[in-house]
Image (tube, rainbow, N blue to C red):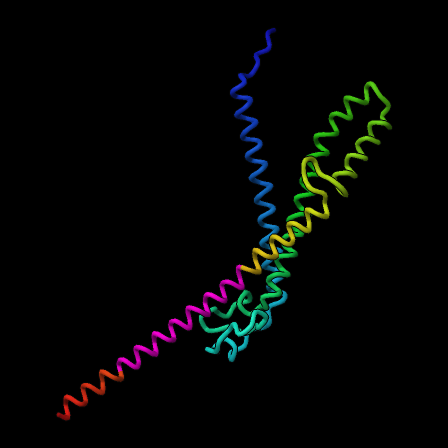
Amino acid sequence: TVDRAMPNGEINMGKRIFLFSSAFIKNTILGLAVFETYENTIHKFAPPSSPSTSSSVSSSFTSNESGNHSHGIGDDDFSRTLVSHHFLAGLLAGSAHSCISRLFEILSAATATIPSITRSAKVEATTVAMTNFMSKMRNIIFFKATGGMSFMPSTIHHAIAHSLLFGSYEWIKRLLIRQFEQVEKRDRMNDEEEFAREGKKQKVKICS
């Protein structure tokens, strides 16, 4: 019998599909972990809604740490939560991202190392192979992943990055909404003054 070898093109295409699918699944899980951690943290920190708060039209952002909000921002958990809590939620979300990403690296390293241990066990003692395997896994878990940063620097990096991302977004959003409200209020006052002047002119014409 003659073995029929699969063309290189089909092998490369299959490998590309596998790599794309695995990366897609990994990034999907990481994204879900980040946003679920962020949203659940915000829901826990958000104060309960009250009728007086939801109907308030006062300025919402007199300071960065004020938990008040204006009618334009809305009355949901994200708007009622302090900006500092948004930074904290981002910090936790980034930490979750780093931990789960490290778990994927451990699984990837384990699946890549175990077959080589099985082959090497044929020519060298099993204890030596297992010692090398455990040493490599310790490096991955506690110190350095394959081609990546150490665990603690990686966690700090992701935590700070996500904290700045979510916190600055919420801070800028509130700041812009406040500016839009001030412009809208000024335009409304100008329209009312213009309407009052037009009314006075009409009265003068009628009287004359």
110 sits left or right of 166 in the view: right
Q: Position of residue 163 (x, y in %)?
A: 61, 57
Q: Residue furthest left?
A: 208
Give whichever of 5, 46 is nearer the camera.
46
Give whichever of 175, 25 is nearer the camera.
175
> Quick check: is 141 in the magenta stretch?
no
Q: In which quarter of the image is residue 11?
A: top right
Taking the spot 58% from the left edge, 50% from the top edge, the residue there is: 32
Quarter of the picture containing the N terminus is top right
Magenta region, residue range: 169-195
Q: In which quarter of the image is residue 132?
A: top right
Quarter of the picture containing the C terminus is bottom left
Residue 168 vs 144, above or below: the answer is below
Q: Residue furthest bottom?
A: 207
Give whichever of 113, 63 is nearer the camera.
63
Please name the predominant secondary structure of the magenta segment in the image.
helix
Q: Position of residue 143 (x, y in %)?
A: 76, 42
Taking the spot 57% from the left edge, 14% from the top edge, the residue there is: 5
Taking the spot 69% from the left edge, 43% from the top edge, the residue there is: 102
Q: Where is residue 49 in the image (x, y as percent from the top left)?
A: 55, 73
